[in-house]
């Protein structure tokens, strides 16, 4: 095909694809025989030749199999059958397969390879795309996953309907993917289509597909994605009986296999299996008890509460861990998604499916960028600015969470939104507003982690969750402190003073009811048997974190009675343990921060944090949805009012 690298792309048949994807012996075909009914002798001859060449009676195969033990419905095109084109019979077969998958509550994997509408059947064939798209929409509305693997080539009405509706979409390496095929473009416009546009790699870079995957990896990646998307969903019915139609024998009657281990970013740290259902207790409203309350006893030993300047500096260190590090250490089955799915990609926003602390969820967070050469914590912390495309990517993650009933974890760590002509013309302010509206009304459970910097609207857009957890040195402000200082004093020199007055610290946010829980960043907090992430004493006082540094437990501050705002930048002191005191005193020398921060032992901190987040997510998921949504609305309605 002119203007593409199509000649270099190998093309597996539909049967070969099925054999490569499903577990051996598990395929069961759903297709009923199709008769040739056309009166057009030329078209009849074309159909007969296609049947002889492929051994199939139509351009699509449908059925079910198992992928790592999980029942999955699968529809695939056979390109050698009239270029995989879709006519009335093929369209009806697709719709019946999708409807059956929905009725049996099976996830659906589609693998199109098609030139689009079957021209021999004209307009009525063209309209098959409407009913296929409607069936896919109903499937997704039922809370069932829909995965798409675009094969070479996929064009026309197929791409413009069921090929572009996946929750997650991948494509073959080098595959031709485009609305108008290059042959049609050249015939209509008398010139070749620009090279390098209609290929899988370019589309991934532009946020249209999530991954470029060879067939050899499709099964493993699909299994990993479905371990997240299907977690906690309704159990599908018994396996279908064996039948004569399909690639190989009967479906395995056994249930879904237990996943063999993590398959995400660089292995998880001590995380496996499902989340512990005995996670934190559910909150009962805005001013109710925290998810897990400390055991009553003598005055609690607490860590030193840092000042605004100290926390802002700590949050801007290049060594401080970000959302990618959190997924590396505390998550498994991680599947990054690329962009909006609609042609935009913003490096300032990471979107992924994952199991965090054992709990399946959609993760979206600000993508922390390493500091530039010679940049220090004294500056405003450039970070990776977030533009409108990043916010639209975030809203894609919110939609996936809502459609599949998955918890949503947002991670705030941003120096602010992009300030540019492109951002303004791209609708930055409007996207912030729409994120706020989506977050407040999202039916899925929501948890926000304030991990580092929280400057301006880019931070606010991800904040309105059912619960908010903050790292000790995290902060939240209307603008970067330097910007607020410039407004109030026409200089940036008073940034830390202004930040202290504005109450940006995690302790201030906790006192105002904006944050529910603070996680200490000291890896050695467990020396006196302080509390773990569930608010209970570890029997041995040693914790069970897996990672670097000493054994460590999640030390949290929660509820009311936390130091109030207005402390200036010197910092306050709450009652603290001997271990915390020694750590703080030891860090005074050499200009190091007075309160240890996550950059000192990041993996130990993230491992503790991951377990806490997993428990919080599991607890939110266990709540009655109506009660949780009502509590969320009350929570945000009361912001700023007396507690």
Image (tube, grey):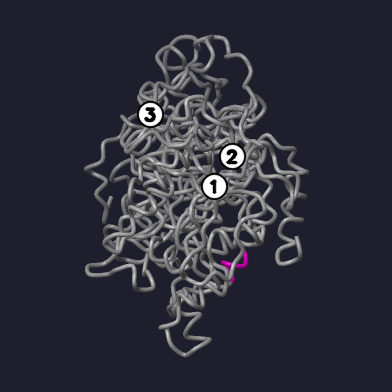
Q: Is residue 267 in sight in this rendering?
A: yes
> Mark on residue 182?
none
Q: How dense is the environment of label 2, judged by Cα within 10 Å: few (below 14), some, or many (20 and up)? A: many
At 34% from the left and 52% from the top, the residue drawn is: 599
Residue annotated with mark 1? 409
Q: Secondary structure at mark 3?
A: helix
Residue annotated with mark 3? 220
Q: How dense is the environment of label 1, judged by Cα within 10 Å: few (below 14), some, or many (20 and up)? A: many
Task: Say whether disc 3 or disc 1 marks the residue closer to the N-terminus.
Answer: 3
State yes or no: discs 2 and 1 in contact (Cβ < 8 Å).
yes
Determine the image quadrant of residue 642.
bottom right
Q: Is residue 145 in sight in this rendering?
A: no
Work out which quarter of the rendered image holds the C terminus and state it.
bottom right
Q: Where in the figure is residue 593, as x and y percent of width and height? A: 36, 60
Q: Is residue 242 above or below residue 70?
A: above
Q: Where in the figure is residue 147, as x and y percent of width and height? A: 49, 37
Q: Is residue 18 left or right of residue 142?
A: left
Q: Is residue 253 above or below residue 627?
A: above
At 30% from the left and 64% from the top, the residue drawn is: 591
Q: Please tell me whether residue 433 belongs to the stretch shown in magenta.
A: yes
Out of 215 and 12, give the one closest to the viewer. 215
Residue annotated with mark 2? 617
> Magenta segment range?
430-434
Out of 182 and 546, give the one closest to the viewer. 546
Q: Is residue 280 above or below residue 243?
A: below
């Amino acid at each position: 095909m002119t203007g593409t690298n199509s000649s270099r792309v190998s093309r597996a048949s539909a049967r070969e694809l099925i054999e490569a994807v499903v577990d051996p012996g598990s395929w069961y075909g759903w297709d009923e025989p199709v008769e040739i009914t056309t009166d057009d002798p030329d078209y009849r001859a074309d159909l007969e030749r296609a049947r002889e060449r492929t051994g199939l009676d139509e351009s699509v195969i449908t059925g079910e199999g198992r992928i790592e033990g999980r029942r999955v419905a699968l529809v695939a095109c056979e390109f050698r059958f009239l270029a995989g084109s879709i006519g009335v019979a093929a369209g009806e077969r697709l719709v019946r397969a999708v409807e059956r998958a929905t009725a049996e509550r099976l996830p659906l994997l589609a693998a199109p390879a098609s030139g689009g509408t079957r021209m021999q059947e004209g307009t009525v064939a063209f309209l098959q795309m409407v009913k296929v798209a409607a069936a896919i929409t109903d499937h997704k509305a039922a809370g069932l996953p829909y995965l798409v693997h675009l094969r070479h080539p996929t064009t026309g009405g197929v791409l413009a309907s069921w090929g572009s509706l996946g929750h997650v979409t991948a494509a073959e390496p080098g595959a031709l993917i485009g609305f108008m095929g290059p042959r049609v473009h050249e015939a209509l416009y008398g010139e070749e289509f620009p090279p390098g546009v209609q290929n899988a790699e370019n589309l991934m870079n532009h946020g249209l597909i999530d991954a470029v995957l060879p067939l050899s990896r499709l099964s493993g990646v699909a299994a990993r994605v479905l371990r997240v998307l299907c977690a906690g969903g309704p159990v599908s019915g018994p396996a279908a009986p064996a039948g004569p139609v399909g690639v190989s024998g009967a479906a395995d009657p056994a249930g879904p296999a237990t996943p063999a281990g993590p398959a995400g970013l660089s292995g998880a740290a001590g995380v496996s299996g499902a989340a512990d259902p005995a996670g934190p207790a559910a909150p009962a409203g805005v001013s109710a008890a925290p998810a897990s309350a400390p055991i009553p006893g003598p005055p609690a030993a607490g860590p030193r509460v840092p000042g605004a300047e100290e926390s802002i500096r700590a949050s801007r260190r290049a060594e401080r861990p970000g959302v990618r590090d959190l997924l590396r250490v505390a998550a498994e089955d991680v599947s990054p998604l690329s962009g909006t799915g609609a042609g935009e990609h913003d490096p300032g926003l990471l979107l992924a499916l994952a199991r965090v602390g054992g709990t399946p969820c959609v993760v979206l967070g600000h993508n922390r960028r390493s500091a530039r050469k010679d940049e220090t914590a004294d500056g405003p912390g450039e970070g990776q600015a977030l533009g409108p495309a990043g916010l639209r990517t975030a809203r894609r993650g919110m939609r996936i969470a809502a459609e599949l009933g998955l918890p949503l974890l947002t991670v705030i760590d941003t120096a602010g939104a992009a300030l540019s002509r492109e951002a303004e013309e791209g609708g930055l302010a409007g996207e912030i507003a729409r994120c706020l509206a989506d977050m407040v009304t999202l039916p899925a459970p929501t948890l926000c982690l304030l991990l580092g910097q929280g400057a301006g609207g880019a931070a606010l857009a991800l904040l309105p969750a059912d619960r908010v957890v903050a790292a000790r040195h995290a902060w939240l402000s209307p603008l970067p402190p330097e910007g607020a200082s410039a407004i109030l004093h026409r200089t940036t020199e008073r940034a830390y003073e202004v930040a202290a007055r504005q109450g940006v610290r995690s302790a201030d946010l906790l006192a105002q009811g904006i944050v529910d829980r603070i996680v200490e960043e000291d890896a050695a907090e467990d020396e006196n048997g302080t509390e773990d992430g569930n608010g209970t004493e570890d029997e041995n006082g040693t914790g069970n974190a897996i990672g670097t540094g000493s054994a460590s437990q999640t030390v949290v501050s929660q509820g009311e009675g936390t130091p109030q705002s207005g402390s200036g930048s010197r910092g306050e002191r709450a009652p603290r343990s001997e271990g915390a005191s020694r750590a703080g005193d030891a860090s005074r020398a050499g200009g190091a921060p007075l309160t240890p921060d996550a950059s000192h032992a990041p993996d130990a901190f993230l491992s503790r944090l991951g377990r806490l987040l997993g428990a919080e997510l599991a607890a939110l998921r266990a709540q009655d949805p109506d009660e949780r949504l009502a509590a969320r609305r009350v929570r945000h309605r009361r912001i700023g009012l007396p507690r």
